[in-house]
Amino acid sequence: MDKRKAAEIILQAIAEQAPVQINWNHEDLWINAILRGLTEVEKAETPGAATPRESR
């Protein structure tokens, strides 16, 4: 599964489970934020990679 599809699934779960109202007109903003988070997770899982705070 590609990261975009994973982000869409996560956003749908947020819409269904979290106490937030998703403005679907801003879906791309939500997807981009989730994609950035998934990218940070990948970086953190890479052996020898800096943590997100260390790389800032």
Image (spheres, rainbow, N blue to C red):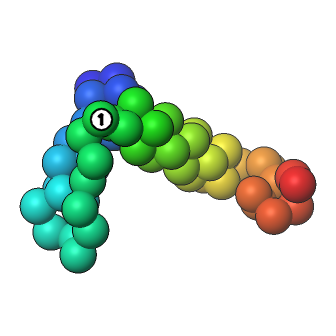
| Relative to 25, residue 19 above or below | below
Where residue 31 sits, quadrant-wise, is top left
Which residue is depicted at the point 76% across and 60% down? Answer: 51
Q: Position of residue 40 (x, y in %)?
A: 62, 48
Q: Residue at x 40, y 31 (%)?
A: 28
At label 1, which amino acid type do we have? Answer: Asn
Q: Is residue 5 rendered to the left or right of residue 3?
A: left
Q: Which residue is located at x 26 percent, y 68 percent? A: 20
- Residue in front for this viewpoint, 14 or 42: 14
Question: Can you say whether 32 is above or below 16 in the image?
Answer: above
The C terminus lies in which quarter of the figure? bottom right
Residue at the spot of label 1 = 25
Is residue 6 visible from the viewing direction of this image? no
Residue at 78% x, 49% y is 49
Q: Residues within 10 Å of mark 1 (few under 14, many from 20)?
A: few
Whole-percent x, y for residue 36 in the image: 57, 41
Q: Judging from the image, what secondary structure is the residue with disc 1 in?
A: helix
